[in-house]
Image (tube, grey):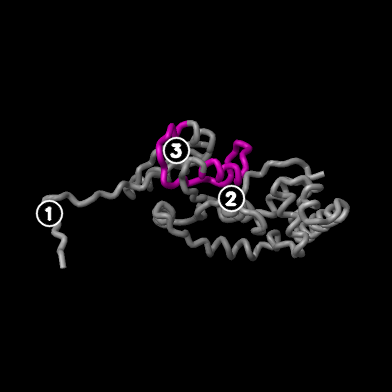
Amino acid sequence: MSETVTDPNTPAPTTSPVRVAIVDDHESVRLGIQAACQNEGFEVVLTAAGVQDLVENLAGREVDVVVLDLSLGDGSTVTENVKRVQATGSAVLVHSIADRVASVREALAAGAAGVIPKSSATKTVMAAVATVARGDVLNNLEWASAIDADRDFAKAQLGRREREILHLYASGLPLKLAAQQLGIGYSTAREYLDRIRVKYVEVGRPAPTKVDLLRRAVEDGILPGLDADGGDGR
């Protein structure tokens, strides 16, 4: 049996520091997370007040984790921000206050790697950054419990045909083409769509537009997280 001998003069391999970017529209929050990251030995590549600033100023630099505030004051949406950050090749760790359950659910549906409450201790936030940077799953049990307990997010009880129509229509197909694909008439498909909207109203989650239906389909796992882009559904 051969034995591998390690040369004692060969330096041990070094581990690159975790590369972090921070997006929050409050300077004090950015500075606080930056200081904590630096104390932890992480490399803070960039801080920004919005995702647009982040994208414009990364200039090809690689980031392992972007700590992203859910509610930025620039009119951007949660799904849009998560998707744009992911497009840079970085994982997304959402940093949110605890009462924004709707936005948390949207962020997770869009593909965020995890959510950490802003009320968490700094040590907990840093541990979450390290977990996401390793590609491990962040335990979102606290958030899952909050979402499940929120009556606004009771799933609409959709039948099989209703789910199929919602899947095709919310994916971008005109209702006429969705009906043809399922082998049903346009008027029948319209009845299904109207019924779907009624059911979402009944659980306190109205979806009057096509974009709203897309969001509901993502939230309920009927579609994967997508960039919401569509008309009013009529």
Dot 1 corresponds to which residue?
Answer: 7
Residues shaded magenta = 57-86
Residue 229: x %, y % from top left:
68, 41
Q: Residues within 10 Å of mark 1 (few under 14, many from 20)?
A: few
Instruction: Check if residue 64 falls in the magenta segment.
Output: yes
- Quick check: marks 2 and 3 in contact, CB under 8 Å? no
Label 2 crowd (10 A; few <14 / some 14-19 / many >=20) = many
| Quadrant where the image shows the N terminus | bottom left
**Mark 1 or mark 2: which comes first in sequence?**
1
**Residue at x 70% of width, y 59% of height:** 152
Amino acid carrying mark 1 in the image: Asp
Q: To which residue does mark 3 refer?
A: 47
Please tell me which residue is depicted at 56% across the width and 47% down the height of the picture. Answer: 70
| Cα distance in 3D space between marks 2 and 3 | 22 Å
Q: Please check the rendered image and state whether residue 76 is part of the magenta-colored stretch, yes or no.
A: yes
Q: Is residue 200 left or right of residue 76?
A: right
Q: Circle 2 sits on which residue?
A: 110
Give the answer, above or below, for where 206 lies relative to 145. Answer: above
Q: Nearer the viewer, mark 3 or mark 1?
A: 1
Along the line of sight, the residue nearer the viewer: 60 or 171: 171
Q: Amino acid at mark 2?
A: Ala
Q: Please state which amino acid type lies under the numbered disc 3.
A: Thr
Please indicate whether residue 44 sits to the left or right of residue 139 in the image. left
Q: Residues within 10 Å of mark 3 (few under 14, many from 20)?
A: many
Q: Nearer the viewer, mark 1 or mark 2?
A: 1
**Helix or strand or loop: what does disc 3 sit on?**
strand
In the orientation shown, which residue stands out farthest toward the right? 187
Q: How far separated are the C-alphas under marks 3 and 1?
A: 42 Å
Task: Name the foreground residue: 98 vs 70.
Answer: 70
Disc 2 element: helix
139 versus 178 height, above or below: below
